[in-house]
Amino acid sequence: MAYRHIAAFYDLLDLPFEVGRYRALRPVLFADLSGTLLDAGVGTGRNMPFYPQGAKVVGIDLSPAMLARARRRRDRLGLDVDLEEMDVLRASFPDHAFDAVVASFLFCVLTPEQQAPALRELDPLGARVGAVEQAAVLNELGQALGQLWRGVGHVAVPLARWRVGLVDLCQSKPSRQRIVYSRSERSMAYRHIAAFYDLLDLPFEVGRYPALRPVLFAGLSGTLLDAGVGTGRNMPFYPEGARVVGIDLSPAMLARARRRRDRLGLEVELEEMDVLRTSFADHAFDAVVASFLFCVLTPEQQAPALRELARLCKPGGQVRILEYALSENPLRRFIMRLWAPWVRWAYGAAFDRATEGYLAEAGLRIVETRFLYQDIIKLIVARPV
Ligand SMILES: C[S@@+](CC[C@H](N)C(=O)[O-])C[C@H]1O[C@@H](n2cnc3c(N)ncnc32)[C@H](O)[C@@H]1O
């Protein structure tokens, strides 16, 4: 749906760039290519005039509205291009179906979490993967401005994202690395918000969460994992005598968690680690807890993250998850929808991750689910099968 409204204006809005900037880039993207080609994220078909003579091109796009325009362009140009509605994250082509795969301004539309899965999907399809992409200047610019005034940095980062700079022109596979977000770049996601995290969360920590967090740890003992520990908001509720390890992807959040740990005089191990790929042994923990982590993970990351938590939990142990859900109450739902763009922008989070739906495929059996706050904050208790 994302492109439904913009599709009608897309070519018009892009016109200055198409005339000034892109005309020189698009031919380079297709230079030397032949055979069967995939144009991933074909959009309105702006690449079509540059498709190599004699090549058989297939264009895919998620948006029917953009594809409708691409079909009109194809017919106007008298080309023989297959156009299919398909998600680049779940393409239905067999491996090695194409001689080359091309994507222009596709990856800037995908979230950081979607970058690697999209490349993983495209990679086996063709012998070469090439892309023209937006600039990766956002980190540097954000950092520089952030030092000047962190608040300005917040506004500047999304704006900077739109600057065209990096041009990764259809090179052979090693160049892919240049457009994959590395783990350390992903871990930057909470860098800017970390400084404000506790302040922004304060109304909830005072009003909503103090009653919920103790429930998350009630009855737990032994060695516990707090996955996505953040700034350590759960720490005051860790069970006495338990050995707790907290992991988080963000060094900035972890730095704050360390300060809280020291302030509280606790002995919590804190490690920078991705919940999708931890370095712990199987069954290393008596119980695993994650509060407001799964709302931050993308739909594609839900099952792999749960699988990893199931692996880490001892047989008979519990995986406990505290998560948001979109309310069924019309007024609350409306308010949550108003709130959602901010939550997405600031935290990369969403209220409708429906984590429960991924438990079975991750090898977890539901023990209990219940709402702890209205019908919007839910406790999920599960056990490894
Ligand atoms: C909304 S915060 C919740 C923090 C804390 N659990 C709480 O209850 O306040 C989500 C945290 O998950 C972390 N995170 C996001 N993706 C992660 C991943 N793949 N692995 C580990 N931590 C991750 C973020 O850095 C952030 O600190």
Image (cartoon, rainbow, N blue to C red):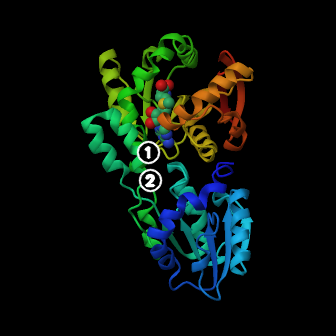
Examine the rendered structure and indicate whether residue 170 appears above or below residue 209: below
| Residue at x 55%, y 83% (from the top left corner) | 33
Specify the quadrant of the image occupied by residue 236. top left
Left or right side of 28 for 251: left
Examine the rendered structure and indicate whether residue 258 appears above or below residue 156: above
Query: Distance of mark 2 from mark 1, alpha carbons?
Result: 7 Å
Cβ atoms at labels 2 and 1 below 8 Å apart: yes
Q: Secondary structure at mark 2?
A: loop
| Residue at x 62%, y 31% (from the top left corner) | 351
Q: Position of residue 309 (x, y in %)?
A: 57, 38
Q: Secondary structure at mark 1?
A: helix
In the rendering, which numbered label is found on residue 162? 2
Instruction: Tell which of 370 and 345 is nearer to you.
Output: 345
Instruction: Tell which of 269 and 273 is nearer to you.
Output: 273
Amino acid under label 1? Answer: Pro
Residue underneath mark 1: 158
Examine the rendered structure and indicate whether residue 167 appears above or below residue 205: below
Left or right side of 307 for 76: right
Specify the quadrant of the image occupied by residue 378. top right
| Residue at x 64%, y 29% (from the top left corner) | 337
Q: Position of residue 127 (x, y in %)?
A: 56, 78
Residue 317 visible within the image = no
Instruction: Give the total number of marks visible in the rendering.
Output: 2
Instruction: Tell which of 44 and 97 is nearer to you.
Output: 44
Amino acid under label 2? Answer: Trp
Q: Position of residue 364 (x, y in %)?
A: 68, 36
Residue 359 visible within the image = yes
